Amino acid sequence: MTRILVFVDNDRGTLSPSALEALTPARVLAESLGASLELATVGEGGRAALEPAGLGGYVIYHPILSDYAPEAYGDALAQLVSEKEFSAVISLGDDRGAEVMAHTAAVLDRPLVANVTEIVDTDGPDGSWEVIRVRWGGSLLERARLRSDLKLLTIAPHTFPAPEPNGDAGPLDTFVPEIPDFLARTRVVERVKLAEGLTLATAPVVVSGGRGVGSAENFAILEELAELLGGVVGCSRVATNNGWRPHSDQVGQTGTRIAPDLYIACGISGAVQHWVGCMASKQILAINTDPEAPLVTKADYAVIGDLHEILAAVIAEIKART
Amino acid sequence: MNILVCVKRVPAPGARIVLTDDSQGIDTRHLGFTTSPHEECAVEAAVQLKERHGGTTTVLTLGPPDAVEQLRYSVSVGADRVVLVPADSTEWDPQATASALVEAIRSLEGESPFDVILFGNESADSGGYQVGIRVARALGRPVISGLKGIEIDGDQVVGRRETDEGFEVYRLPMPAIAAAKEGITLPRYPTLPGRLKSRRAEIDEVPAEMTPGGQEMVSLLKPAEEVTETVILGHGAEAAPGVVRLLEEVGLL
């Protein structure tokens, strides 16, 4: 029996909204291979969190794993995979998933294909698979061949919807790996809370500015609109590099990938690196003087003209309503 | 404090990426090249650590002869020594990359390991998210990815990593390895003396074997072009009522 394992991260007992996304393509894969599908997570806190997934599997428990510790997580997952003879392991390619899977792959000395969007063929020469994976943050794709007895994949975030909750959870066995004490050296030692409330990653609306905003001071009007709408301000790489905004506000390939209900892009032309950070937004409104700007042509809605004038009018209109 | 930074030369695309006719690469005839962004910030972080704690900053790249351009740039922003590990310009898989880097690092280090080795979190072009971790595992050193802050405290590297709520702190005993994300520092611009120094800089060459792994590129492809019918809500201030209607439809007002 072919066994497929899905690694699901939990942060001290809480799943992120996207945590179960990898389960969606994994179910399809298991069905096409006639394989069993099981879950693994770390820490007793994960047990209850995994119930909505409606699958059995393993809760990995060890005192060193009391908080996130990528090296120890990687060793633990590698042991589970070897001992239970899984033939494929799939995880979401978010920060932690990518990191834990890379450790697992390094420990087991196997290839790891990152950010897969499609499993094209599982019946290639010598048992190889063909997959499509993300390159350039999503502006290009790669058809890749994976040759390995053990298939390790991460799934590109925001590619698949998380599955609907399914109440019939199977049994979750406890798995206790052997982890040398010294691997506690890369465990989280402290957490610092910064912003209470909304962040780029969670806000329902992001009002973002780029070169067209012109200065740090000019972001005030974007701040005002974001506050009126219950959102946050973002920016392009140009705004960060010019020192107008902190890097933590940056939307893009090397900044934050966002998926708000509405993305309002002001004075952002839309280089590839920016587009891949905002393309998961449900709706995009571009405000730009240039009707041919790439982001204007890719947006759902656009307003052509001076962003300062337009935002001032929009704010006045909103205020007039109340 | 001796620090090594591993960087990758990548094309600097603008709004569109064009593939070569055989779909084996991107058409770089009209593109410049740059250091992959996370790694450019890692170089700056290393130079700042050196300025605070003394020591040297070495920058290494695995790449074709043209990658000397990125090494010289590193010198212009503060690197002391630069090393080319020659490779051809074909595609290498993450295991092959890691194997060559491990060999090159071992030969550079001899008996005295670098206190800190920095990588970028992922390269801009191939984005494998694993080379730094594979190298660290092979060298038996602690590693943490995704750092947005790095400091030295005694014999420990203190790293900060962003989360949805704030940040997590890690303390790694040195020698340690870390993968940096853009935003860990704001890279400086080269100064005129820096540029002059970079022109004269000696490029050390350290050969290394690549052992191919199990991932192989078949071809590159463009994602299905999403044809978006952009609805123009208007021009200038007169568009405000239309924008407000959209905000209502989305449920923000």
Image: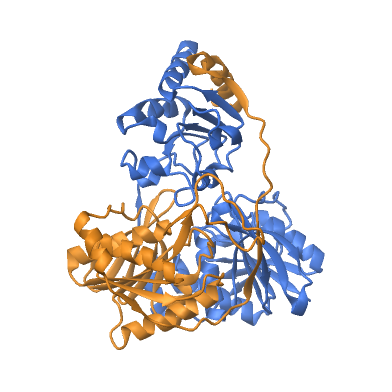
One can see residue A154 in this view = yes
Where B175 sits versus B166, above or below?
Answer: below
The reply to whether residue B160 is visible in this rendering is: no
Q: Position of residue B109 (x, y in %)?
A: 32, 83
Q: Nearer the viewer, residue B73 or A111?
A: B73
Of all residues, the one furthest to the bottom in this rendering is: B111
Q: Residue A145's quadrant in the figure?
A: bottom right
Quadrant housing residue B218: bottom right
Residue B197 lies, in percent from the top left, at 22, 64
* Visual hue assigned to chain A: blue
- Identify the residue shown where x is 59% and y is 43%: A280
Above/below status of B15 relative to B253: below
Q: Nearer the viewer, residue A263 or B16?
A: B16
Q: Is A88 on the left-hand or right-hand side of A208?
A: right
Residue A286 % position (x, y):
53, 30
Camera-nearest residue between A193 and B47: B47
Q: Is residue A302 above or below residue A61?
A: above
Q: Residue furthest front?
A: B29
Q: Is residue B115 left or right of residue A206?
A: left
Apparent side of residue A53 relative to residue B171 in the rendered image (left or right) = right
Outermost residue, top side:
A320
Colour convention: by chain
Q: Is residue A126 above or below residue A240?
A: below
Total numbered badges shown on the rendered structure: 0
- Looking at the rendering, in which quadrant would you find the N terminus of chain A? bottom right
Colour assigned to chain B in the rendering is orange
Q: Position of residue A291 (x, y in %)?
A: 55, 28
